[in-house]
Image (cartoon, grey):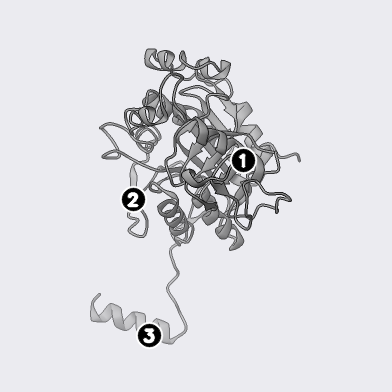
Amino acid sequence: MGWVAMAWLAAGVAAGWVPAAPRPVPVKVVVVTMFELGADTGDEPGEFQYWVERNKLDRVLPFPQGNHDLRMNRDGVLGILAGVGTARAAASTMALGLDPRFDLRQAYWLIAGIAGIDPADGSLGSAVWAEWVVDGDLAHEIDAREIPPGWKTGYVPLRKSVPYEQPREAAKASECYHLNPSLVDWAFHLTENVALVDTDAMRNERSHFDSANARRPPFVLKGDTLSASTFWHGKLLSQWANDWVKYHTGGKANYVTTAMEDTGILQSLTFLAGAGRVDLDRVMVLRTASDFDQQKPGTTAAESLSQTKIGQYKGYLPALEAAWRVGNTVVMNLLENWRQCRDRIPGRKP
């Protein structure tokens, strides 16, 4: 800045004039993804790439305080690559929520990523809308080799001394999140007939399971998610996930998918809502099944785990496709009906 400009600015400040801050950009939809394998475009995709390419998120916005630069399009859709794991995703979400460049007060949030699925409830490539998100990390634990006789698990709820001890305390906000059920129902009914990708590899994999739902071609359903930073796997831990989710929700939720980041993101959004920066009633969680959460009959959990590597899941690419197809159906509906959706959340009675 030259001395003339500096003198002019100093004179203005002395006279009580302060330059106006840039007006925050109003955001209509925030799409939250967690990982990318390489570049944002043009190579093997992670969760972010289809959104960047197909929704033309061409405007790159530097975001050094978060995991990855932001991307936005001219329609008001903002994409964030929040990072893998609860801590990184929570920090990136909080950084976005506090960023003065954006007005997020009327924005809808779509968390869209891949997950493991319980074969009792769904099949590879399926898309699952969650109403409940339960934390699988906050707990007491003893090693499985020291579990007392009669215990089903070595995990014990906080403030308790035995698994699933009653009376159950009301779940705290950090342990259990209940999303807006009207919005979840609206999103599910809007997308329940979206065509999903099926493959020979997926058909072969699901043929080994006895569950009727596991054997189905990919479909859209409602089901709840367990969020834990440990990538767990196996039939016994799947039973724990079912029991844990039922316990923390008083039997109101049914565990279907397992993921990592959702509770961290929701914790940040809860704090941001308290500050009036976001609307929690506008948050949706969509998880799509890249793999089963347990081994197929006739194999061990260890053998199955060795095959569950990112990019090698039997349903990896179909799950990425499902996250975009189903999620984008919701995003486009919100944009096309923005005059109504800006002030009135879909599914909510007048």
- Residue 256 in the image: state x and y as whole percent: 56, 32
Check disc 3 and give the amino acid type: Ala
- Residue 91 in the image: state x and y as whole percent: 43, 57
* Residue occupying the far bottom of the picture: 14
Query: What distance separates the C-alpha of mark 2 from that of mark 3?
Result: 40 Å
Q: Where residue 68 is drawn, which disc sits there?
A: 2
The answer to whether residue 191 of the structure is visible from this angle is no
Local secondary structure at mark 3: helix
Local secondary structure at mark 2: loop
Q: Nearer the viewer, residue 167 or 73?
A: 167
Name the residue at 32% across, 55% down.
62
Quadrant in which the C terminus appears: top right
Which numbered mark, 3 or 1, is in the foreground of this view? 1
Local secondary structure at mark 1: loop
Q: Where residue 331 is drawn, which disc sits there?
A: none
Quadrant in which the N terminus appears: bottom left
Which residue in the structure is indicated by mark 1?
A: 150
* Quadrant of the rendered image containing residue 338: top right
